[in-house]
Image (cartoon, helix red, strand yellow):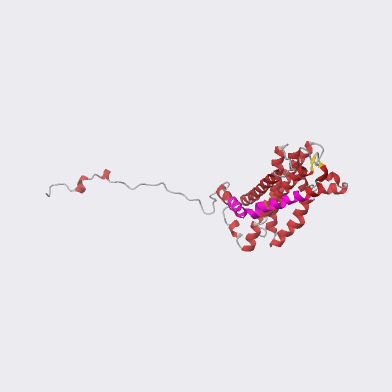
Amino acid sequence: MADQPSSADLISPAAIPQPRSFPARTFPAMGEPVIHQVNWVGLKTLYMKEVRRFFKVQTQTIWAPAITTMLFLVIFTVALGRGGKEVLGVNFATFVAPGLIVMGMMQNAFANASFSFLAGKIQGTIIDFLMPPLTEGELMLAMTAAAMTRALLVGLALTGGMLLWPQVHLHVAHPWAVIWFALMGSGFLALLGLLSSVWAEKFDHNAAITNFVIAPLSLLSGTFYVIDNLAPAFQTVSRFNPFFYVISGFRFGFLGRSDIGDTNMAVLHSAIGLGVLNAVLCLTTYLVLRSGWKLKS
């Protein structure tokens, strides 16, 4: 028995499993950014968070504003639309409907963008916006896109409601104008709302901007009339109001006619001007966020 080999002698060294070797994992040096370009995951997360926030209370944020704006159509149609009154070659209800749609979109874009930062500052949760690995541009883009999404949903709700109104006959004459002026208008107010929420320290400040700036500029921008009916001095004042170009350009997309100018080139110039204005406002908002004014101090 002593001459028989043991089981240990029968196992060759090559048959013994060797431990697996893994490549050495390298980590970035301290202070070196891991995300080198756009943080798409973080941007999408913040965007979805903002969309779910207002969509969770859609009765208040989408349907209520749509119904309130529809009341303008009912009141002004009953008051001014009788007797076959026509404006720009269409009946009064058809004339006023596009202006009300884009007015509702702009006001709700401002309302959405002006809430989050201000609520965070008041409730002490602003750190939730500032601590994640998002650049100022990504933060601005997510907040603005969420506000524009709410504006789009309100606009769709208003369009559906107005198409049911018997006196409204909407036909898209220039799709590019409808899309461009809707995006530029809602983006313009979203950026203004974001700046307002950075500046404001309480909800009364935001309410003051809404009541004394946004509402007057939108109601006195040719929503219910053409500026040709105004005195020359007031026509000049109206042409300094960016809301006028948004509303008249959006109306041009449906009716094919506008009080911006006598030619389609005037509407195109207005579209380019709104794009430049939004670019300047976008840069201003980015610089304010980057400075940390009233956010990090």
- Taking depth in this image into account, of 75 and 198 the one nearest to the observer is 75
Image coordinates for residue 121, horizontal then vertical, percent = 64, 61
Magenta-colored span? 46-75
How many numbered marks does the figure carry?
Answer: 0
- Can you tell which quarter of the image residue 296 is in? bottom right
Q: Main secondary structure of the magenta part?
A: helix
- Can you tell which quarter of the image residue 156 is in? top right
- Image quadrant in which the C terminus is located: bottom right
- Taking depth in this image into account, of 88 and 152 the one nearest to the observer is 88
- Taking depth in this image into account, of 27 and 55 the one nearest to the observer is 55
Residue drawn at the location 61% of the way across and 59% of the way down = 126
Image coordinates for residue 222, horizontal then vertical, percent = 79, 47
Residue drawn at the location 71% of the way across and 41% of the way down = 178
Residue 105 included in the magenta stretch of the image: no
Image coordinates for residue 67, horizontal then vertical, percent = 69, 51
| The residue positioned farthest toward the left in the image shown | 1
In this image, 12 relative to 22: left or right?
left
Q: Is residue 284 visible?
A: no
Residue drawn at the location 64% of the way across and 60% of the way down = 119
Image coordinates for residue 158, horizontal then vertical, percent = 69, 47
- Can you tell which quarter of the image residue 83 is in? top right
In this image, 260 relative to 202: left or right?
right
Residue 62 included in the magenta stretch of the image: yes
Q: Is residue 254 visible?
A: yes
